[in-house]
Structures are given as C-alpha cells and as structure tokens.
Amino acid sequence: MNDEVLTADERRCLRMWFRQAIAQAEQQDVAATLYNEHYGNEAESDTPATHRHTVARRRSRKGRMIPHLREMVF
C-alpha cells in the first residue's frame, strides 16, 4: 500500500472540490423538488402534458343584490 502525504494545497483543493460537488448536488435536488411541486409528477408520467388543468372558479354574482345594499332596503 502506498501512503502518500497530501500537501496543504492539495487538501485545500480537494476540500473545495467536494464542497462544490455537494453544493451542486443540493442545487439539483432543490430544483427537482420545486419542479415536482409546481408541475406535479407530469414529467414522470407516460402521457405528455399539453395543457394545464383548469381550476374550478366561483360563480360570479351576476343579477344578485350586493349584500350591503340588501341590508339598506326597508
């Protein structure tokens, strides 16, 4: 077995390289999590997502009296 001693400069370079690799892995993990939260797991499904799903909306109050005006009527 060959036990070579690393210089301080080599250890510093290795430390920086590992920190950069860990930071990049964390960035990719966070990006994947955010993507999955926003788009769901559509990227993993077999069918391509062409349109976003529509969200049910509340009906408008057309033709109804506004509540505070209804209270004013005697």
Image (cartoon, rainbow, N blue to C red):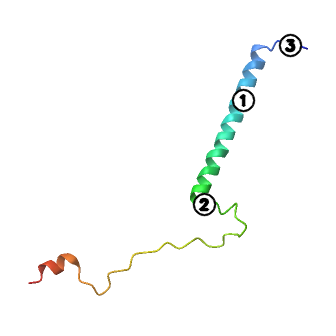
Task: Tell me which residue sits at (82%, 12%) in the image.
Answer: 5
Identify the element where label 2 is drawn: loop
The Cα–Cα distance between marks 3 and 1, rounded to whole angstroms, is 20 Å
Separation of residues labelled 1 and 2 (CA atoms): 32 Å
Image position of 2 (left or right of 31):
right
Q: Between tags 1 and 2, which lies in front?
A: 2
Badge 2 density bin: few <14, some 14–19, many ≥20, Cα 10 Å: few
Residue 59 lies, in percent from the top left, at 38, 79
Q: Quadrant of the C terminus?
A: bottom left
Q: Secondary structure at mark 3?
A: loop
Which corner quadrant holds the N terminus?
A: top right
Q: Amino acid at mark 1?
A: Phe
Q: Quadrant of residue 41?
A: bottom right
Residue linked to disc 1: 18
The numbered mark at residue 70 is: none
> Mark 3 is on which residue type?
Glu
Mark 1 falls on what kind of element? helix
- Which residue matches tag 2? 40
Q: Are marks 1 and 2 in contact (CB under 8 Å)?
A: no
Q: Give coordinates of residue 54: x percent, y percent.
A: 53, 73
Which class describes the residues within 10 Å of circle 3: few (<14), some (14-19), or many (20+)? few
Mark 2 or mark 3: which comes first in sequence?
Answer: 3
Q: Residue at x 70, y 27 (%)?
A: 16
The residue that disc 3 covers is 4
Amino acid identity at mark 2 = Gly
Residue under the point 60% across and 61% down: 39
Residue 28, relative to residue 60: is it above or below? above
